[in-house]
Every structure is written in C-alpha cells, then in structure tokens.
Amino acid sequence: MKRWVAEGRAWALLLLLVGLLVSQSWVTYRIFTSRVPGGNDFFSRWSNGCALIWTGQNPYSDEVTLQTQIRMHGRRALPGEDLAAFSYPLYALYFFWPLCYVRPYALVQAIWMTLMLYGVVAGTLLMMRASRWRPSTWLWGVTLIWAVVNYPHARAVLLGQMVSIVFIAVGLVFLALRRRADFWAGAALAASTIKPQVVFLLVIWLLWWAAWQRRWRLWWGFGLTLALMGGVGLALVPTWPLDFVDDVLNYENVTNSPYHSLTWMVVRHFLSLGPAVEAAVTGLVVLYLLSEWWRNRCRRADAMLWVTGLTLNLTFFISAQVATTAYLVLLLPIFQLFRLVYHSAPRQAGWIILGTEGLMLVSQWAVFLSTIQGNFETAATYLVLPCTLLVIQVMTRSKLTEDRPQ
C-alpha cells in the first residue's frame, strides 16, 4: 500500500511539472518570444542540427549553415556577424531533437528557455549538494532566485545557451561521486563534453584523480558513454568528428567574438603586451594548476572539491574562447566558499552570504550595463567574477583543503 501511495505521489509530481512546463512555455511564447525574436545561440544549434532530421543533411555543411544564416538574418551573414555554424559535437543534438518537430522557432525558443530556466534551478540545487553547503530555508529560497537573475545565469537562459546542460551534468558528476556511483559519474562527465571548451580540464583532472583513487568505474562510465554518443553520431554523419574539429579551429570567425582567454584579455587587451608574454603567463597558470593536481591527487572530500573549483575557474584563463554564460559552473567553488563561511562564522553566515550574493548581482549587472558596446560585452564584464574568485580561492586554500566533517 505504501509503495502504491509513493508511486502515486511521484506520478502526480511528474504531471504537475509537465503541466507547469507547458503552461510556462506558452505564457513565455505569447508574452515574450513571439514579440521579441532572440535566442540566437540556440537557434544556430537547432536550425543546423535539425537539418539532419528534416532533410538528412550534414549539420556542419556550408549549405546548411547558409540556410541558417538566411533564417537568422534574412540573407547571408556579413563580415562581423555570427556565421551561425553548428560548432558543437554532433551528440549535442541528442539533448534537443524532439524540438525539431516543433514550429515556429518562437515557440521552440519559449520551450527551450523554460527548460534552461529549470536547468539553472536544478543545477543550483545539485551544486549545493555537491559542495555540501546546507543553507537555512530562507537563504536556500533566496539563493535559488539569485541564481536565476544573476548576470551570467540570466544571460544563459535568455540566449538559450546549452551550457545549462553542462551545468546540470557537472552537478550530477559530483552527486554520483559522493554516492560512490562512479560509473554514472563518468556518464554524466561524458555528457558535459557537449561544450568541451568549458570542461576539458575538468575531464582530465577527474580522470587523473580517479586513477590515483583506483575508481576505474568512472573511466568506464566516461569511455562507454562517450563512445556510444560519438558512435551513434558516426552512423548518422560519418565525417562529424573532422567537421567539428574544423568548426573549432574556425571558432573565432564563426562567433566573431573579439576576445579569447582571460589571460589574453589581461595581457593583450589591457596591458597591450605581445603574444610571447601571453604564452608565458598561460604557461605559468598551467604549471600552477598541474602542481595542485599533483599535490592533491590522493586527497578526497574538501581538498578534491577545492582543486575541482580551481580547475573550473582556471579553465577560463587558459581556454581559447570564453563566454560569461559558462560561469554557471563556478557556483561549485562559490558554494564551497559559502560552506566555509558557515563553519567560520555560523551566527552571521546567513547575512554575510546574502550580502555577498547581493554584491555579485549588482556588480556584474552594473559592469555589463555601463560598459556594453553595441551587442557585445566588454572585457571588464568577463573579468569581474573569475578574477575575484581566483584571489579568494588562493587566499582560503589552506582552510578549503582541510577535510571537514560531512
């Protein structure tokens, strides 16, 4: 009897969530997306990717890309405009293919925005669990609202960025690791590679750490899931790996982003120094990260989590291309810092964290709105969060690498 009641509640909750998704998507469509065209980040993935389902065409082909440009701009893209290429691994299509059967795009955009909003909320909850931060009820609710309206997160939702899926996948990795479900942790890690520029260092670190811990199931989960996703893609488009690599090598021209790594922004953009200095600084960043990987290869719990947060942050200083929407994953180290505040000042922790969230919210939006140039973010917008976080991570290293009680 109890089992039937539990199953009934589960089905009722599922129906409630589906009803909420449908109604919220419809309201978003009628009030917003049908009147304000946008979500171009997802449009390029949807239009190019769905061509495989609609007509059997290669999503990476010039012909399909031109069709997407015409749908987006009404003509061929001009120099300086987004070329609207697919630019993702083919298996990214697996995460949205049902939307290929929905027309028009304004409705697709509404559904996807709603899903990405839920994704931010779900990912935030997962990051709380992964960092072992347990806020009070009122702060828990405030943090969920803050996570949706904070600049990088809100931008990810409005643009329809698939980084929200990466955000959830990373949260699932650490939830599974805590429960010793290493195979599923590896599977989630493989799913996160739909945006490899965000997680390539994370993948290397976790595989390295798992090898020293002899947790080989993570390797199996990662390898088999990646092989399955990539193998199905090969059956559909045999040339997709080479096509994807070509898009990656041409990514600067595809997106027309004026910026590269955070190191590039500081060294080349602000200090006007040459590529040799940039390469030297990047090399020092890599050496520092590798030293932390080596020193903490056999550690667990907080130390492992601190290195993970450092890895996620330093990725933006090393990766050839950076997007502020990807800062979603930085909630993992941020929540670890919040947990440290709870241990260090338990009585004032709630108000300290509330003030910190308010400062982050105001400062990031203020920098964006006061420096925006046309449709582009300025370098200052990119640097505020990761640079501040890096300083705090280094300053609190000794405390954050202590294994605290769970």
Image (tube, helix red, strand yellow):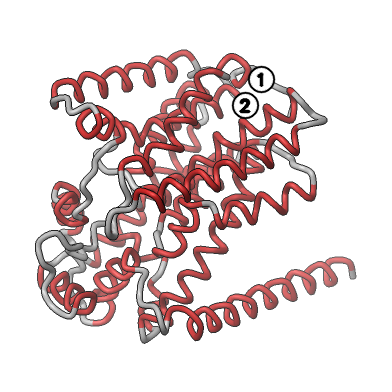
Q: Is residue 296 left or right of residue 197?
A: right
Residue 166: give x, y in percent of width and height.
44, 51
Residue 179: give x, y in percent of width and height.
65, 39
Would you say the residues marked 1 and 2 are in contact, meaning their CB atoms lie under 8 Å apart? yes
**Closer to us: 243 or 370:** 370
Q: Amino acid at mark 2?
A: Ala
**233 versus 245 height, above or below:** below
Residue 322: give x, y in percent of width and height.
31, 44
Residue 353: give x, y in percent of width and height.
68, 38
**174 versus 53 height, above or below:** above
**Closer to us: 1 or 96:** 96
Residue 403 - label: 1
Residue 142 - label: none
Q: Residue at x 60, y 56 (%)?
A: 122
Q: Quadrant of residue 175?
A: top right
Residue holding disc 2: 301
**Given the current orientation, which residue lies at the most extreme right position?**
1
Element at label 1: loop
Q: Amino acid at mark 1?
A: Asp
Disc 1 residue crowd, few under 14, some 14–19, many 20+, Cα 10 Å: few
Element at label 2: helix
Q: Is residue 250 left or right of residue 390?
A: left
Q: Quadrant of residue 38?
A: bottom left
Q: Of callouts 1 and 2, which one flags the residue occurring earlier in the amino acid sequence?
A: 2
**358 versus 72 height, above or below:** above
